Image (cartoon, rainbow, N blue to C red):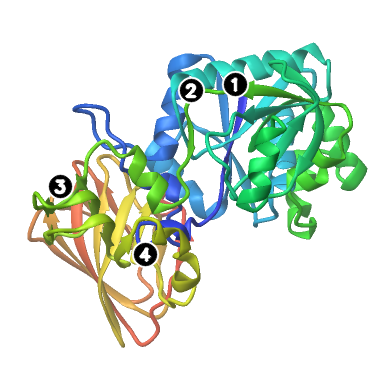
Amino acid sequence: MNIILLSGGSGKRLWPLSNDVRSKQFIKIFREETQAYQSMIQRIYRQIQSIDKDAVITIATAKTQVSAIHNQLGNDVNISVEPCRRDTFPAIVLATAYLRDVQGVSEDEAVVVCPVDPYVGDEYFQALMDLKVQAEKEEARLVLMGIEPTYPSEKYGYIIPEDKNAVSKVGTFKEKPNIETAERYIAQGALWNGGVFAYKIKYVLDKAHDMIDFTDYADLYAKYESLTKISFDYAVVEKESDIQVMRYNGDWKDLGTWNTLTEAMKENCIGNGVLDQECKNVHVINELDIPILCMGLKDVVVSASPDGILVSDKEQSSYIKPYVDKFVQDAKFAEKSWGSYTVLDVQEESMTIKVTLNPHQRMNYHSHEYRDEVWTVTAGTGKVIVDGVEQQVKPGDVISMPAGCRHTMIAETELQVIEVQLGKSIRASDKQKYELEDEF
């Protein structure tokens, strides 16, 4: 089975754990018994592999998410990288061309597209396989998954089938309604449109060629920035007359708000948190090294990260975005392909960061024009290379790097370092990368 997982968005509705750098699908809050915490993207990726070990999974995502994907899923995952954001139609076309031109998948193969962030049971993946089989039959050019509604929701578009069969022709589509209208749709047998569908590769590429002048994946990638921003629903789904919908009535949750996310949590506290016996329906997610104590609270979520602290009634938490949009600050936590970093302190001419390198990983070999840096190793072992000179490091070692010198760090075990940046101009763009092999 060929699957395209759509991984996009900044997920500000889950602030302070999500931000412009870390989207909601990378937050690690799911745990099965004694296993380590997993993120949404880790969970769905491994669920697919457990159901279909031969599945070819391609993640369609923006450049800003590539490092986090490699950090959480490894370096062998297939990624179709958008050079810039252009909504779901260009992203799906690019990923489809990637399958044909880079992965060598035949145009006659069926592809299933689904979001990376629903919380689902294993039956969902059997339904994806059924969706792929239905697309292969070519009874319709496009096959959607329609999710049986569990309540009248304003968050989803609706699909109204022509009949109540397991697979039906689509009668019409409806935009996101108010509650009263959603109740009427459901009474008519409407299904939620969860953005899950299947098609043959040739179908989408033919549609794309009608709208975009390109030859192959490389040409499309080069022209990507000039493409019109448009969703797959507007560009294709709502204009297609030959379309089917397959009903799905298994577990499916869109974890887009704190209210829905905490419903999927199997414990009330993640991180350093304590609830007294009077707390009811309270959840704490704490990424800070300080305790959080909750007493006598009801229906509340408390979330703390280096980016801020949220204390909210669960229902009210759905309206967080306009408030978060007013915050003007750089993200203080980010995952990289080699590990992660947390900003500890920011002053006018200095920044202090805690850097964690995963075992056997290394940073890019790089230099800075406008700032000096000092590394203090606090845990683990590894080596640093400064202007071609290699040095083994251990806890207590201090390495100074004046502006202009080339440097990198390589971890043997997990390596923790306090990095102090010093200069009148400290910004992320002040970074020049080099090939390490050039030094030897």
Residue at image mark 2: 48
**Viewer-nearest of discs 4 and 3:** 3
**Viewer-nearest of discs 2 and 3:** 2
Where is residue 290 shown, x and y percent of the image?
A: 12, 62
Residue at image mark 3: 381
**Viewer-nearest of discs 2 and 4:** 2
Q: Answer yes or no: do the residues labelled 1 and 2 have beta carbons within 8 Å? A: yes
**Residue 165 in the image: above or below residue 153:** above
- In the image, 183 versus 312, the foreground residue is 183
Where is residue 298 shown, x and y percent of the image?
A: 23, 55
Question: Disc 3 marks which amino acid?
Answer: Thr
The earlier-in-sequence mark between 4 and 1 is 1
Indicate which disc residue 128 carries: 1
Q: Residues within 10 Å of mark 1 (few under 14, many from 20)?
A: many
Q: Which secondary structure, mark 3?
A: loop
The earlier-in-sequence mark between 2 and 3 is 2
**Residue 115 in the image: above or below residue 340:** above
Q: Answer yes or no: do the residues labelled 4 and 1 have beta carbons within 8 Å? A: no
Residue at (18% x, 54% y) in the render: 416
Residue at image mark 4: 406
Asked where in the image residue 169 lies, by quadrant, the reply is: top right
Question: Disc 4 marks which amino acid?
Answer: Arg
Q: Answer yes or no: do the residues labelled 2 and 3 have beta carbons within 8 Å? A: no
Q: Residues within 10 Å of mark 2 (few under 14, many from 20)?
A: many
- In the image, 195 versus 435, the foreground residue is 195
Residue at (47% x, 63% y) in the render: 319
